[in-house]
Amino acid sequence: MSDEHLKLTLKALKDRFGIHESQFMKYPPTMEAGPEQIVGICKMLLDEFGFNFLCELTAVDYWPQEEPRFNIIYGFYSHAENERIAVRVPLKGDHPSLPTIEGIYHGANWHERELWDMFGIFFEGHSDLRRIIMPHDWEGHPLRKDYPLGYEEPQFTFNYDEIDQRKHHARYEEA
Amino acid sequence: MQEPLEVNYQELQHLVSERALKGETVLLNMGPQHPSTHGVLRLLLELDGEVIINCIPDIGFLHTGIEKNMESKRWEMAEVMTDRTDYLNTTGNNLAYCLALERLAELDVPPRAQAVRVILVELERISNHLVWLGTHALDLAAMSMFLYCFREREAILDIKEMCSGQRMMTTYFRPGGLWRDIPAEFEIAVRRFIRMFPGRIKEYEALLKKNPIFMDRTRNIGKISAQDAINLSCSGPVLRGSGVAYDVRKAQPYSGYEQYDFMIPTGTHGDVYDRYQVRMEELRQSLRIIQQALDKLPYGPFRSNNRKYVPPPRAELGTSMEAVIHHFKLWTEGFTIPAGAVYQPVESPKGELGFYVESDGGNQPYRVHMRTPSFVHLQALPFMCKGHLVADLVGIIGSIDIVLGDCDR
């Protein structure tokens, strides 16, 4: 119930993984780590410091910035100590990938599927990385910043074939 | 003729058992238009006779791109979209969003606004639990509950309408306080409700608590241990039903919840019946909170005085040039929020609702992510329903209290 445990955790993370604190997030206290470290960090947080609850897993796209283009945010909560902590993982490039933490926190499964669906972030070793919210034949990753917020293009005679090729399932057939 | 678009058999191979591929078990589609799935949820069931071997939820039928849409709206406009996610807990979503913004902007909220927020959010919790109780009982063949629950819910909707002019999608909470002060008859209406409601809870329990049909269909059904529930990130009544007394209102109080005296009800077995009991007790605890908040409802301003975020009172516009400028700025370009990010959890009736809000310093959110309880709890559904009958699945879906708008966003 005190800050002691949180300070101890942050210090252990700094010492063992050589990562630094990020001031960008106002709450909760956040560390910035590399994608290869995340599994080790999760194991340590769960086994040694009792952060047993994955409360948040999401991503942000900083397009057109390339390095890093994405940030993944992991949020952890400890029921025993009543503390929250977050880890931000910057990712480079348009097709980033990082290891899954599904084996440590089962609750990450759907969150990672959502990130694959919405941002196109690939999770290595994920047991079931299918699209979750969008239809399974959808193209593109809607929450990326370079994905336009737009509407369906109307099908006229001049672009009928072009759209028909992409969306043959929407074809009008006379009964 | 085109082949209908269906999920490929190979794609599902790793999800179903060997026996399904050999044809020994049956794959059955439940939903997305099944009334007991509480919306448009599709479940692919693998059945051996009537026993569920495996359950594969398929969500996304109600995806409306709310998170994407919010990125192109101004801060105050984006709030309107939060109502539409969990449409049974609209004020609760507004509260989470406003708290996140207030934390980012370091905006103060006067005590009166905080108390009114607590009252309305607790009323909303009761209203949400009433819809849950009605539909859950309806799924388990107790039809009359539905009618009684909606009768009481009507009173809560009337109170919300009285405050905000809207019955459901209120957007009554604004960053920095409330849209307007509560009307004079608000207190009378709420007091009338909390006088009437304890008796009604007794009536509900008389119908269900010791009802042998209800007990048969809920006890030892859909069990989940505390360990599994935590590992699957369950929260709210699902986690409390398994015996973990975790409630964000107590653990990390917001909006002045630390002033109120209330209990966190917990169950022991983690089955459907325990979740039912937890929620019924929560109705009483919510009434306690409303009573306390109403008794010491402070007078004073109902919104912050920070004119960079909150519009000036109408009367000032005629006398103060500064007020006109602030008004003009707020109505033309909105307010900006300093760059930064925050994760703000609140206790929604369904569990922990978290808003991750990121600002790049502009007048629109850079990214909003809602960690919604329905999404997370639906993930735990396959773990709860394995080995049960199809008829029990309906009860389990009801007991985790999902709203598909909340799940698909």
Image (cartoon, grey):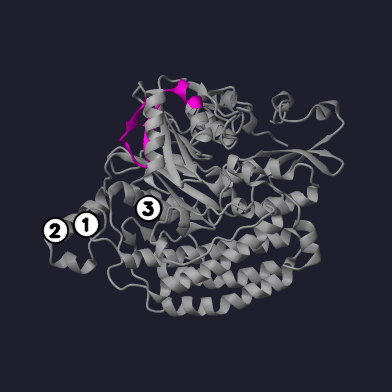
| Residue in the image at 37% along x and 32% along y | A11
> With B195 as the anchor, is B57 left or right in this view?
right
Mark 2 neighbour class, 10 Å CA radius: few under 14, some 14 to 19, many 20 or more: few
Indicate the secondary structure of the residue bearing disc 3.
helix
Indicate whether B120 appears above or below B227. Answer: below
Q: Residue at x 59, y 62 (%)?
A: B129
Do tag 1 and tag 2 residues touch (Cβ < 8 Å)? yes
Q: Residue at x 58, y 46 (%)?
A: B234
Report if residue B312 is visible in the image.
Answer: yes
Instruction: Verify whether residue B364 appears in magenta.
Output: no
Query: Which one is closest to the eye, mark 1 or mark 3?
Result: 3
Instruction: Work out whether mark 3 precedes mark 2 in sequence or the reverse, and give the earlier one.
Output: 3
Please give the residue where the numbered disc 3 appears in the rendered image. Answer: B99
Q: Is residue A34 magenta?
A: yes
Q: Which residues are magenta?
A: A19-40
The amino acid type, in three-letter code, at marker 1 is Arg
Where disc 2 sits, the SS reads: helix
Q: Kindly identify which chain the residue marked by label 2 belongs to.
A: B
Q: CA distance from mark 1 to mark 2?
A: 10 Å
Between B74 and B282, the one nearer to me in the picture = B282
Which of discs 3 and 2 lies nearer the camera? The answer is 3
Q: Whole-percent x and y of residue A27? A: 36, 43
Please report, as a chain letter, where disc 1 is located: B
Q: Are marks 1 and 3 on the same chain?
A: yes
Residue labelled with disc 1: B307
Instruction: Examine the image and state in which quarter residue B145 appears.
Output: bottom right
Q: Nearer the viewer, mark 1 or mark 2?
A: 1
Name the residue beneath numbered marker 2: B322
B151 in relation to B171, above or below: below
Find residue B114 and report its horizontal and vertical position in percent: 36, 63
Residue B27 x/y as whole percent = 79, 36
